[in-house]
Image: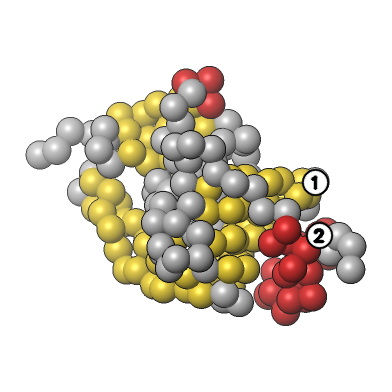
């Protein structure tokens, strides 16, 4: 089939998911395995002025950190596996878990501007899962939230949605206000 027409798909996110079905096997073959402590491996597939496309190969049972998409919108298409997505909400200076939803292969998860979420790959005995991420515009300045340390990390564009072990991936840190 060859590479899907990423710029066309990025312009019409709602119409993208069905068009990806013929490319599923090829995309799964490109799956990036996660590094030792990362929840998923990242394989960038496309990035331009319109947006970006990234393939994620998830470790079974792994969860990414709560994060935003730097003012972008998009869609995450589940190519393989089962995932739980959790919304996060700011309340009185604290980041709290909101609603959760379960997603499976073929589902398209909407990513809203300004939203904060996390995802967890279920351990279904099949080795995690694979997701395809389409964002517009391309993510620049993603924030990752660390509830344990009560801080927000702005991370480099080549960092995934996890608390980086490599300090060079952190652009800035902002402490959350003190609890009352």
Report helix, strand or loop for mark 2.
helix
Report helix, strand or loop for mark 1.
loop
Note whether 57 is above or below 170 in the view shown: below
Q: Name the mark on residue 48.
A: 1
Image quarter of residue 116: bottom left
Among all residues in the image, which is located at the extreme top? 168
The residue nearer to you, when weighing 104 against 127, is 127
Among all residues in the image, which is located at the extreme front? 125
Query: In the visual, does 8 lie left or right of 83?
Result: right
Task: Tell how many labels.
Answer: 2
Say which residue appears at 37% left-offset and 61% top-offset.
87
Is residue 142 shown to the viewer in this render? no
Quadrant placement of the C terminus? top left
- List x then y, in percent, for residue 124: 43, 68
Compute the Cα span from label 2 to label 1. 10 Å
Say which residue appears at 74% left-offset and 68% top-offset.
25
Note whether 151 is above or below 77 in the view shown: above
Please report whichever mark, 2 or 1, sits nearer to the chain's N-terminal start.
2
The residue nearer to you, when weighing 109 against 178, is 109
- List x then y, in percent, for residue 135: 65, 56
Query: In the visual, does 88 lie left or right of 39?
Result: left
Among all residues in the image, which is located at the extreme left? 180
| Residue position marked by numbered label 2 in the rendering | 6
Q: For the residues labelled 2 and 1, say whether their Cβ atoms are less than 8 Å apart.
A: yes
């Amino acid at each position: 089939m060859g590479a899907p027409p990423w710029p066309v798909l990025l312009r019409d996110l709602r119409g993208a998911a069905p068009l990806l079905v013929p490319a599923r096997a090829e995309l799964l073959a490109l799956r990036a395995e996660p590094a030792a402590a990362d929840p998923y491996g990242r394989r960038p597939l496309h990035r331009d002025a319109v947006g970006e496309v990234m393939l994620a190969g998830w470790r079974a049972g792994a969860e990414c950190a709560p994060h935003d998409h730097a003012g972008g919108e998009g869609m995450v298409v589940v190519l393989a596996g089962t995932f739980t997505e959790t919304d996060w909400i700011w309340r009185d200076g604290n980041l709290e878990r909101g609603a959760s939803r379960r997603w499976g292969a073929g589902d398209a998860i909407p990513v809203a501007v300004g939203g904060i979420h996390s995802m967890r790959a279920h351990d279904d005995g099949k080795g995690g899962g694979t997701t395809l991420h389409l964002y517009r515009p391309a993510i620049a300045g993603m924030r990752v939230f660390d509830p344990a340390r009560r801080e927000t990390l702005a991370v480099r564009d080549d960092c995934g949605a996890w608390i980086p072990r490599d300090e060079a991936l952190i652009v800035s840190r902002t402490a959350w206000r003190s609890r009352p």
